[in-house]
Amino acid sequence: MRRRRPRRRRPSAALAQPRVRLPLRPRARLRTSAAARQKRDREVASKDPTRQAVTAEGDWIQREGYLPRLERIASELAAEWGLELGPRIAAGRYSYVAPAGPDAILKIVPAEDTDADHIADALRFWNGDGAARLLRHDAARRALLLERLRPGTESAALAEDDATAIAIDVGRRIWRTPQPRHPFRPIARWVERWLPRDDAHPLVPTARRTYESMAPRTDRVVHCDFHHHNILSRGEEWVVIDPKPHVGEPEFDIPAFLWNPLGTVPTRERTERRIRAFADAGLDGDRIRQWAIVRGICDGLPIRPGRTEADRKQLQVARLLI
């Protein structure tokens, strides 16, 4: 699971531009029966290659023993809110996620995932513009009833340049200045949590030096897990799901996009091409590189037993940019 001292800058004019109208359109919504929807839910949970790939990295809530507690809460909410829950969606590694009828998704976040404390606040702030809509929220049980995105295609299914163009368009919509009295933590708190405190790995001092030179801004709401598998189609537009919201600078969000989607291997050419695309849209390319070094080392460590550095795409991207 992954998840500053502010320096004011003028917001980029490029980020304030009207939305990009992209020619790419997802397939039309299909009308299906309840039985067909349930069958599709099971297939998504068990057969979809992308979701299998996500699950293969490890089911965190099951491994840590949180799943029984979350399943109990899901049963309580199903009764209280009148929900018909489908089988758990396997891609929900860090929370309990299940379809709740044809038009909603139930998501329950374990209290241990503190990076996700303010999901509901972010979804209310975005109010459906660039993000999935929040339908209902139980703060005490950390439960969210979300709109079910249709057709729900991940941008990972698209061609490389199309996925990047869509990410730029969605980013323009969600990287907004929050209200003065907002609940979001600064990204410095994220770094303090995830940057290793010892130098057991040779890349840690590099991450620390890079971060200490940056003095990050805290003037925009950022997603913190902004990548192909969290950008989905809704009708003819694309929106984000699963934020870990903080306040920071848009460049902080780009590294996760650099080492995704699953099933790809980072290369220097692909990494630099993506950075150039975001820079052409108004972001700071050098700043993206700095954050990719810091976040790549934070997210890539520690390396679990039985794995090697070659298994950690985050570290691969960091090394490409050092």
Image (tube, grey):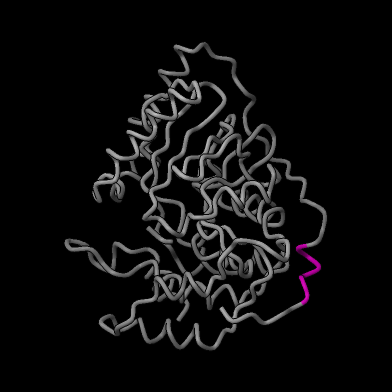
Q: Position of residue 321 (x, y in %)?
A: 47, 77
Q: Is residue 108 above or below residue 11?
A: above
Count of numbered circles in the view: 0
Horizontal side of 96 relative to 188 (left or right) equals left
Q: Position of residue 130 (x, y in %)?
A: 67, 47
Q: Is residue 36 above or below residue 168?
A: above
Horizontal side of 268 relative to 163 (left or right) equals left
Q: Quadrant of residue 141?
A: top left
Q: Which residue is found at the position 80% from the left and 62% from the top? A: 16
Q: Quadrant of residue 128?
A: top right
Q: What's the magenta region?
A: 10-15
Q: Is residue 253 above or below residue 80?
A: below
Q: Which residue is found at the position 43% from the left and 41% from the top? A: 108
Q: Position of residue 25 (x, y in %)?
A: 67, 36
- Image quarter where the C terminus lies is bottom left
Q: Position of residue 196 (x, y in %)?
A: 34, 77
Horizontal side of 304 relative to 231 (left or right) equals left
Of 143 and 53, which appears nearest the observer?
A: 143
247 falls in the magenta region? no
Q: Is residue 321 above or below residue 51?
A: below
Of 55 and 270, which appears nearest the observer?
A: 55
Q: Name the magenta segment's main secondary structure.
A: loop
14 falls in the magenta region? yes
- Image quarter where the N terminus lies is bottom left
Q: Which residue is found at the position 59% from the left and 19% from the top? A: 30
Horizontal side of 272 relative to 303 (left or right) equals right
Q: Quadrant of residue 183?
A: bottom right
